[in-house]
Amino acid sequence: MNTDSTRRWLALGALAVAMLTIGLDVTVLTVALPTLAVDLHANTAALQWFSSAYTLALAAMMLPAGALGDRYGRKKFLLAALLLFGVASLACAFATSAGQLVAARVVLGIAAAAMMPLSMAVLPSLFPEPAARQRALTIWITSTAIGLPLGPIVGGWLLRNFWWGSVFLINVPMVIIGALAVLALVPESRSAQRFRVDVAGVVLSALGMLGLTYGFIRFGEYGWGNGLAWVAVAAGVLLLGAFVLWQRRTAHPLVDLGLFQSTGFRWGTALSIVVNFAMFGMFFTVPQYFQAVLGVDALGSGLRLLPLIGGLIIGSRVVDKALPKLGTRAMLAIGFALLAGALALGALTTVDSGYGYTALWTTVLGAGMGLAMPTAMGLAMGELTAERSGSGSALIQALRQAGGTIGVAVLGTVLATQYRSELGTLNRDPISDGVNAGVSVAHQLGDSAMLHQVQTAFVGGMAAMLWVCAALCAAAAVLAAVLIRAPRAAVGEQQERLDDAPHVGQGADASESTHVS
């Protein structure tokens, strides 16, 4: 392996560490909330904002961050985002009030909004060969996904041994490693066209994503009858509609909507959103099942997700070897079939199933994710030229983020509705608020019959939600098998796109399209 090749794989390793940090940060907070409530005197609303502030900032700033990276330099903005993420992590760790922590989480979300698309956008310049780029994308995606189940494990261990600020402080050394590696190893790249930043598009997209995301977060918390949530969603939809119209008219759009004319981008992005549904469905229910039904603590819950990581690693290794031989169509169909089968097995879980059964289907689920997620993302990324890889990557990530937020609200409603339906005569406050409240009441009363009914009702709600996810994945498997074309030619087509694309630092006509249909 020559020096240049070694340098770029080391750079990928640093990017993977940075993305692992983001994955950890998404879930590590969940185990710290009870401690934060006491130490920062945070009420329920403040606890919700600790998570929502990050999500809203992430959703609002992702599209602008990708476009700014294209315009002014992806390495420059990625490096700044890494440093900002580290500073914000320090601010979170040493916050002395709920308000300070919320503000620091907003800054953390802004930094992550730039890190996610721009770390993906530099991959084409680091790995111009399609096979190497797909392998790099698989590693990048896997590092993010592994961070999610690792969050409760790392957070639980840190809280058991240190103070709550350590769950944020752990980000700092990882960010420093990533920043130094990006500075030394990642080449600068930017669009050859010195286009103006679409300020109107930035404002419309940020406000639209903010309204849509906030509305669905409120739906998840307060139910579908919440008036403010409907107002926020309606405003978000109108603003995003105005954004789309503006993008069609302006000479320098924030994103290239013509990408959706490409089958690869359209289906790759759509299938990536479906994978997110399956992933969020699992993360929304299984940790609750471990704690409320199996009776383990947060750390024990995180440790019981290790089979998912094992399956994910196996799937990502298999896709690396099998994708060039079997093609995109086959890998997507197999990956989504595994996801559908695993979720169906999960939906058959009972109160008495035990951990072994859950370990089995979460392992299969991880393998399906490892096959489907990198393949779908590679399909979408294959349509991006070097010119607008930042804004294109941001568009993919923003749609995945929006889809995940909406999915949590919808799937949470399915679970809650079925849970309350199966409670029967126990469908009353506070038991109806959720399984954790129900289990707490049953333990306080020492009522084993009530405990069994609450647990059974939750498992019924979990089953209903997982059946929805399984049906979506089964449909995705069929659509992938039928609609994805030229499964074995995907790598060759990606090479042609790369050869035709304007290379970093070269001139390009202002009217040149940023995608290949």
Image: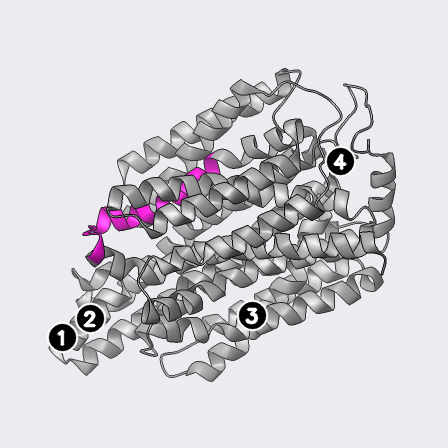
Q: Amino acid at mark 3?
A: Ile
Residue 479 seen in the figure:
yes
Q: Nearer the viewer, residue 287 or 447?
A: 287
Disc assigned to residue 386: 4
Of marks 3 and 2, which one's residue comes earlier in the chain?
A: 3
- Of badges 4 and 2, the one in the foreground is 4
**Could you say whether the residue bearing mark 2 is in a helix, strand or loop?**
helix
Q: CA distance from mark 4 to mark 1?
A: 61 Å
Q: Which residue is mark 3?
A: 309
Residue placed at 47% from the left, 55% from the top? 171
Q: CA distance from mark 3 to mark 2?
A: 30 Å
Residue placed at 26% from the left, 56% from the top? 36
- Of badges 3 and 2, the one in the foreground is 3
Residue 77 point in image, percent of width and height = 59, 36
Q: Quadrant of residue 445?
A: bottom left
Q: Which residues are magenta?
A: 39-60
Tell whether label 4 touches label 3 (CB within 8 Å). no
Of marks 4 and 2, which one's residue comes earlier in the chain?
A: 4
Q: Which residue is mark 2?
A: 440
